[in-house]
Image (cartoon, rainbow, N blue to C red):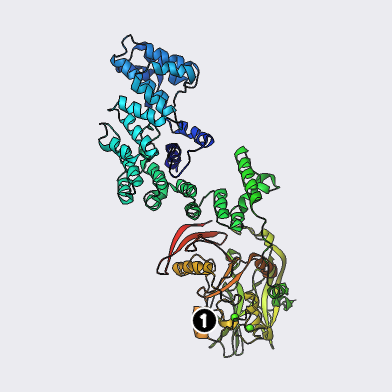
Amino acid sequence: MKPCIAALVSSVLVIVGAGVALAAPSEAELRRHLPQRIYAGPACLGEILPGKDPGSAAEGLKNLGVPPASARALVGVCRRPYDKVASDLLLEALDGASDPASEGQVVVGRIVEALLARHVVAVEGERRREVLSRLPPARAAFVEAVLADGEPGQLEKFERAASLAPDDPEKRLCYADALLRVERTAEAEAALASPPPGSDGRVVAALRAIALAQRGAYQQAKDMVASIPTPTGGGPAVYACNIQPDDARCTVTWIFVQAKAYDAAIDVAGPFCGASVAEAYQELGRTFDAYVALRRDSFDDPLAAAKLVAALGRPDVAREHLSWPLERCRSAKKEERPADEKERAECEQILAFVATLPEAEAPSTVDPELRRRLAEKPLASSYQEVPAPKGERRAGPPFDIPGACGPVLFTALEGERGLAALACGDLDPKGELSMGGVVLYLSDDGGKRWDGPFHTGFALGFPYYVRRDTAAPVFAGDVIQLPVDHREIDPDSITFPPVSLRAKRTARDRLVRIPLSILRRDQDGDGLTDLVEERLATDWTKADTDGDGTPDGVDDAPLTKPVNDPRARFVGAVIEEKKMVALVHEPGGSMFPTPAPERQADRPTRFVEASFPLSGLPGRTIALNGAAWQLYRKKFGPVYPTKIEVVTSPDGKRAVVDLDERWRRAVYLVEEKADGSMAVEQLTAWIT
Ligand SMILES: [Ca+2]
Ligand SMILES: [Ca+2]
């Protein structure tokens, strides 16, 4: 990123006076970048004086014919460049030889020019005029031009310096650069037509590319930029007018953007100039493009992203971007609070910005019927739990369950009656906390054919773990006695990764008594048992929960009537494109006894948190808003639905789709093409 920071500095200075798209930056804006210009400046010893230490610098100057008195003075400047004696020393250096035209004195003039023009030494007011009056006119004019940064008349000063020293590459190229800043393109191209010998080819190409872009010849400009070697870091000194040869491509990117060659610019230089592209888009009022540019960076500035998305009419997403920083800024815990002045200032900015956002809308509402269902006690809580009898423990034979949705935890065979208990994640997206829900398969013919899976209504660790063997009969008439340990994971102990989970209550070696009448019950005959419907948050007394005419068992979105929300289409495009690999909950699709079993494989279920209606996605989608998920978790313990947010562009043709799975996240840009097809591009992805 370093080259870009430097490029941003130079680019901000470069746009001074560009009259077309931008007002000149304010003094405050310039000041903001000045310290970095010093950072980017050359070293006094080694880069401007010919030697890395006072001794070798003095020796180098002597070899160049500089008189000893001048050499001493120049080395003295480098020892204390910020001292006020520096101006006296500069005058001493210039006075050192009796013949101002001598070879040594020419070298002194060049060095004094470089010290001033490259901001190594700052000399102000009358002293500066005195120093400049003793420099040759071309050098004095050039120093004046450079130091006139942002002031009116700077261009004329560069012009004068270039005309006084037509063979000096730096003066000519800086004049061409100044012409480009005010978009006097033809004159700039004339100045660049035959650059003086010794000109840096990278700088010439960069400036020519800017000129081409200003003329609208974007393809040629792009080719020209592409011909410049990519930055390698370090490299030669900064030009006095802040053109940095090593960053030529990056600098041009900014100018390209200013010149409205956005796409060419991003195409060529996007990977190393993200922040400047975002800023440029913003200046041009292309807020959505600026937002996309920021979201390309996984470590984007949350406040910048929040401001942009708020400007796009989404204060809710703005708050979301700032939720982590806000938590820290508002934290009462000492170790979480901002550590230093810089962080405190950032917090102040964030809090001030949040105060400008419209009041958060009423907390997302939950349909009253859904609220009632989620407030009911889980069916599994009606199961009797009793201590297991002591005695000889038995495990059942290993069974091969066709189409099993997960690992087998326990089996039993009593006469012809067989049972297998498995853990399946399909309806219990609990991530790393649990292998998932406990489901049973049943057999009446000694294990040849199996019926199931039947969800028991509980998941491993919430609150039971299934034991491998038992001393009790498993089939007690119409009740299944499953051997378990009661060890409920304490939600307060959950961390990522879950390394130190605690149990709320522990009771070893119990039997949980599951009546077959509850296990198999499908009150509304829609093909989903009550226990599965409970998981899906559908209504087990209504075959068609959302009333759209499609029974729950075969409804892709049983909680959402089909709606034509464009956001759902953008999400659908990502899911189609990515084959759902981005979704944490990857359903096996074998979980559901439906009236159309041949379609079961097509009917995976995903659980998502979305604040907008989500229908029409491939497979089954259980979409609830944040408030409903809170109620769901209160009932069933932690679940990790994929949080989906979609920010659409003002014209509705593009969208940023953000899939957040808490420990995984991926952000996509989706664009609807003219032919109606969708193009999906991944902007970022990370896994903690
Ligand atoms: Ca049902
Ligand atoms: Ca329906």
Mark 1, residue position: 600
User: Is the N terminus in the top left, top right, bottom left or bottom right quadrant?
Assistant: top left
Please name whichever residue, 455 or 118, is drawn nearer the observer in this view of the structure: 118
Please provide percent x and percent y for residue 596: 53, 86
**Number of disc labels:** 1
Vertical order, 421 against 8 (above or below): below
Please name whichever residue, 536 or 162, is drawn nearer the observer in this view of the structure: 162
Vertical order, 57 against 521 (above or below): above
Callout 1, which amino acid? Gln
Please provide percent x and percent y for residue 46: 38, 25
Residue 473 visible from this viewpoint: no
Vertical order, 428 against 15 (above or below): below
Residue at the limit of the structure toward the top, as seen here: 98
Helix, strand or loop under label 1: helix
Q: Is residue 327 left or right of residue 651?
A: right
Dividing the picture into quarters, in which one does residue 613 lie?
Answer: bottom right
Residue 298 visible from this viewpoint: yes
Q: Residue at x 64, y 85 (%)?
A: 520
Q: Is residue 81 left or right of residue 637?
A: left
Please name whichever residue, 64 or 530, is drawn nearer the observer in this view of the structure: 64
Q: Residue at x 34, y 49 (%)?
A: 216
Please provide percent x and percent y for residue 676: 42, 69
Q: Is residue 272 left or right of residue 352?
A: left
Q: Whereabouts is ligand 2, in terms of quadrant?
A: bottom right
Q: Is residue 377 left or right of residue 101?
A: right
Vertical order, 440 against 345 (above or below): below
